[in-house]
Image (cartoon, grey):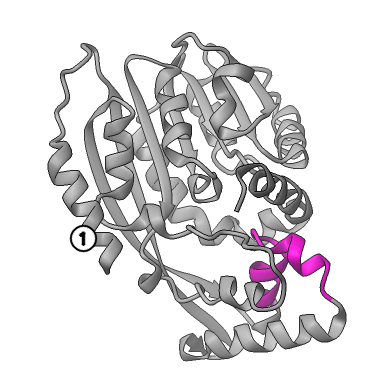
Amino acid sequence: MDAKVHRWVQRHGWDRAVEHYDDTWRDQLRPAHTAVLAAAALTPGDEVIEVACGTGMVTLPVAAAVGPTGRVVATDISGKMVTDTAQRAGELGYGHVTTVRTDAESLGADIGSEPAFDVALCALGLMYVPDPPLAVRAMADLLRPGGRFVAAVWGARRSCGWASIFPIIDSRVDSDVCPLFFALGAPGRLAAVAAEAGLADIVEQRITCHLEYPDADAAVRAAFLGGPVALAWSRFDEATRAEAAAEYLASIEPFRHGTGYRVPGEFLIVAARRDTAEGDHATDLTDLHNNQQQGAMQ
């Protein structure tokens, strides 16, 4: 898909999803968000840039951690997402939070090109970016020497029991919503991207989880209304929606737990630092590229 079209789909898709995102995904994503915050090791006064802030699930804890002497710039491709985050921050009195609607790859143009941040975060947003290496490079460039980078993505496709959602949508509309959604979750892939962006001291962590839904309606709402296929779903007629929902529920039937579902999932967290001296990389790029190639074959 053309990158411009892809960004348009993401922007308007997440504008559609904002109303349902927080209540359908907050609990499900908590293990990843907790891991991101722990790896970030925030301290009062830190200045933080966050990419793909969504409804502020990470932004607001970050703002609390850095306190009023710190600074948080939260960005998202969706205008409605950044508006939602700004409203939540305002309600909590977090005047040190600023929100900006921008593409992940355009941070330098919209935020500034000077290395002005202690921490750069992206919790479960890089899967939706047309050019993840460019986005990670843009984040790394905004870090001061020694600054911390933390990103979370979904893990391997085979470890995510809900992965059928994409072919179910794509079989009904030529959307190509997330053609490479699981690519960064392959072994070594995101670490290699971080290394290529000049980051060092790279650490990977995988977290297994379960997406728990009390009933079929909750599972369908999360999959189709609160996530990346919301735009496509909005264009389906009622018959197509019923058919797609039935197919999705059939795909997660093996994970039924009583009257609800416990659908397996996996998160990948990568933490790193910006080098204090250019060229002084602690990570072996050859090993990372070998891991990347092996992961692509699995």
Q: Amino acid at mark 1?
A: Gln
The 10 Å Cα crowd at callout 1, few under 14, some 14 to 19, many 20 or more, is some
Q: Which residue, given by chain and number where applicable, does mark 1 sit on?
A: 294
Disc tally is: 1
In the rendered structure, the answer to whether residue 84 lies left or right of residue 119 reads right
Q: Is residue 230 magenta?
A: yes
What residue lies at 54% left-to-right and 45% top-to-bottom? 130
Specify start and end residues of the magenta stretch as a single range: 218-236
**Where's residue 29, x and y in %?**
51, 56
Dominant SS type (magenta)? helix
> The C terminus lies in which quarter of the figure?
bottom left
Q: Secondary structure at mark 1?
A: helix
Front residue of 161/105: it is 105
What residue lies at 62% left-to-right and 33% top-to-bottom? 103
**Where's residue 90, x and y in %?**
74, 27
Q: Is residue 39 magenta?
A: no
